[in-house]
Amino acid sequence: MSPQVHEEVLDNGLRVLAQEVRTAPLASVWCWYRVGSKDEGPGLTGVSHWVEHMNFKGTTNIPRDKVKGIIEQFGGYWNGYTWIDQTTYTETATRDALDRMLFIESERMANCLYDPADCESERTVIISELQGGENDPDTLLDQELTATAFRAHPYRHPTIGWLADLESMTREDLYGYYRRHYVPNNATLVIVGDIDTKDAMTRVVQHFGGIASGEVKRRRPTREPEQLGERRVTLSREGTTAYLKLGFHAPSLSDPDFFPVLVLDAVLTGAKGVNLWASFRTPPPQRSARLYRALVNTGLASSVMGGVIPTQDPFLYTISITATEGTPLDRVEAAALAELDRVRTGGVTPAELTKARNQLRARLVFENDSITNIAHQLGYFQTIADWRVFHSLRERIDAVTVEQVSAAAAARLAPANRTVGWFDPIPVSS
Amino acid sequence: MTRTAPRGLAPVRAVAGNGAVLIAKESSTTPAVTIHAAFHAGTVYDPPEHAGLAHFVSRTIDRGTETRTAEEIAESLDGRGVSLSVTVNRHVLSLICTCLVEDLDPILALVADIAMRPVFPAEEVETRRSEIVTLIRQDEDNPATVANEGMLADLYGQAHPYGRRPRGSVASVEAIDRAALRRFHAARFRPGSLSLVMVGDVETSRAIDAARAVFEPWRAAPADVALLPEPAAPGTRSVRVVPMMNKAQADIAYGFTTITRADPAYYAYWLMNNILGQYSIGGRLGDSIRERQGMAYYAFSSMDANVIAGPLTIRAGVSAANVDRALASIDDEVRRMASEGPLESEIKESRQYLIYSLPRTLETNVGIANYLQTEEFFGLGLDYDLRVAGLLEAVTREEVHEAARRTLDPRAATVVIAGPYAPR
């Protein structure tokens, strides 16, 4: 039986999801906005993420110098993240901090200040974040591969933005974007933990009920045209290690192919689960997975990792491979593609399906071991589809058949659907 | 068996006839159990000629036993959705996994088999060697790792176990053979150096019984415990630059030696470090370098008070143009903490944070297992989770200030900067 989730939509359009979980004297609050880097236009790449940073900088009723410590005094943790479809903020703290957490999120929704000096100071923080990421060749390659795989859809640009846009964006760009998207009817508030739902809802109405709804003007969605042939990108830069990345246009969460592809990834690289917040923090059970055997156990690669993540529009199924010292990338690529061809033409076996299902079922248990994770999942799925998907995950995984996985492999792993990325290192000059 | 008062975590701890410590804690959050087996087999036990040996063992110990091939181990784990992590730090090598509760017995038996009877098959050793060499080469291309490992080498000396690179060098790893792996295992993996923690949806007596069944027959004499030289605190400042001109950003690692975990001043140091570089986003360091000056995405400090005086490390990632300014800001904050000490309000905030964050730390099975292992390793007692608040409450402002005075002095800091930076 699914756990009881209370769902309520306030008059201003704010959707609230509350679930009582009494495993620890804690409460977790997440506030989700349906805005991510896919909503950004030319010249404004990275604005969603920058806005997220600015929304920790003080509000009308939480002066900047009081932000620090506002949740820590309850032993609390706070954070936020931005990705292609969503921006979200979270606090987890002792249950007596619930009112404080709701106050913070209501302030964040309506009253952030965007002090010009803070905007400037944060510009360089974000450029530092971007450059820190670029120190990692794998991150750099991922960015290039995604930009190559997509021609039209805004998933093509990195969430952190392109440097030129980060250098030129203004305070007015940031504040305007904030005001357009941070309205209650574009948000989902999730509360999970040692709470009383009725009490929590009373507090929600007190804090959020007076915030006016607004019109959210969305960009007209662009459907990515079908890819007509293999695409390639090669980065030849100074470095020590060679990386290979394969990207395949993948189904969105609403596509019937999504769960077959999730199972396919488990067969190829081990199951990761579907929690963006938690799944990738624990390595997958992958030692008997096809690509691990073909690449790592043969000594061609030191690691292989697949990733298919639930998204609103079709994104990428990405396979990331690190070549072992001295192994040429063409050998690694040939071995990887040969294995993918095998599954594309021969499908998967019933035993592989059983193993993948077992792995995914276990991951669903492991990745919901805290109120923070449960609250994340409710909000995540509501933001890209519907929170009820969270409770149907096991059923949907169980319903996947060998034929569906094999058909998904045949269609999705086709050469014309793939983009190949190389980071081919050139020796570091002394 | 001993049991703490019926409040707090109240784990059950038993010592098997062979000396193995078995600890269990029941938690019904999810129908799963976390198994965390820790051995006194960390990198400090690397022989000088085989730097990276403990890490090499961690990459190969689960690749075949006397009765199971690597393939069979892989199938046993993968078929149940279990991912076994083998981690190694300065003192401890740990086998950690979470399984569904119905898989506890077979997984426990598998973990015991891996710990007790690994054979380090030749083919597996060669395959994992090339993975390790690749990891070392990746580390050499990572400014954060280069700066941090370089700073520890300078602070402790390259020959000191705390100053060596945990993965060794390409040359030292190339020199490690099967015999060295087997010798290390035979010397360090003994029942007396095992602490096994099990946390999950299983009765504690049942978990302890299951652990006894697989570990109790293991017989071996206790292993030696490392006797490490206490580091000599550097009397002068050293700054070393490792140019990595192909990188976009520089990393600064800035450190001091501190105290042992057993030092009564530990709680004052804990608070001092939290105020300096942890509280909210990076404490005073984060407030200055990130929040007020906008120079870095991260600036923080961390402290590892350990068996001997471990390091307090300050880290920041900044553009090459800002390295000098960031370093000056670190010096300022370090100097200010030592000369003026913390504010009473800062102590109150950090103390409250550290005390009230405990329920969050202990929310998940993995979190509880880590906590219990730390309690066991440092001999903190089964009721430590109940006592820790009192220990923090007892710390005075003067004690925190004294901790800062004893340790923080920019004139004695060890600094390494790695990245696209050339000093003026």
Image (tube, rainbow, N blue to C red):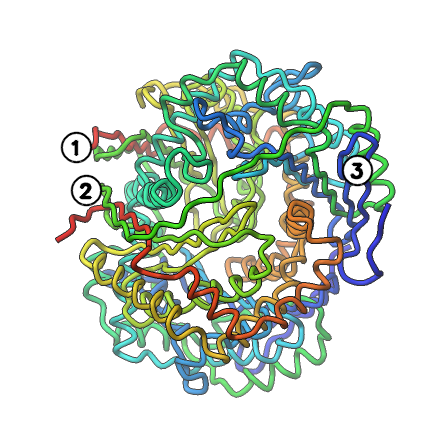
Instruction: Tell which of B246 and B347 is nearer to you.
Output: B347
Residue contact between numbered discs 2 and 3, judged by CB atoms under 8 Å: no
Q: Chain of mark 2?
A: B
* Residue under label 2: B245
B167 w.r.t. A37: above or below: above
Q: Chain of mark 3?
A: B
Residue type of the residue flagged with mark 3: Glu
Residue contact between numbered discs 2 and 1, judged by CB atoms under 8 Å: yes
Asked which secondary structure carries label 2, the reply is: loop
- Residue A262 horizontal side relative to residue B135, left or right: right
**Badge nearest the viewer, 3 or 1:** 1
Q: Residue A342, how many percent across, how many down?
A: 48, 19
CA–CA distance in space, label 2 to label 1: 8 Å
* Residue under label 3: B102
- Residue A355 horizontal side relative to residue A346, left or right: right
| Quadrant assignment, res B246 | top left
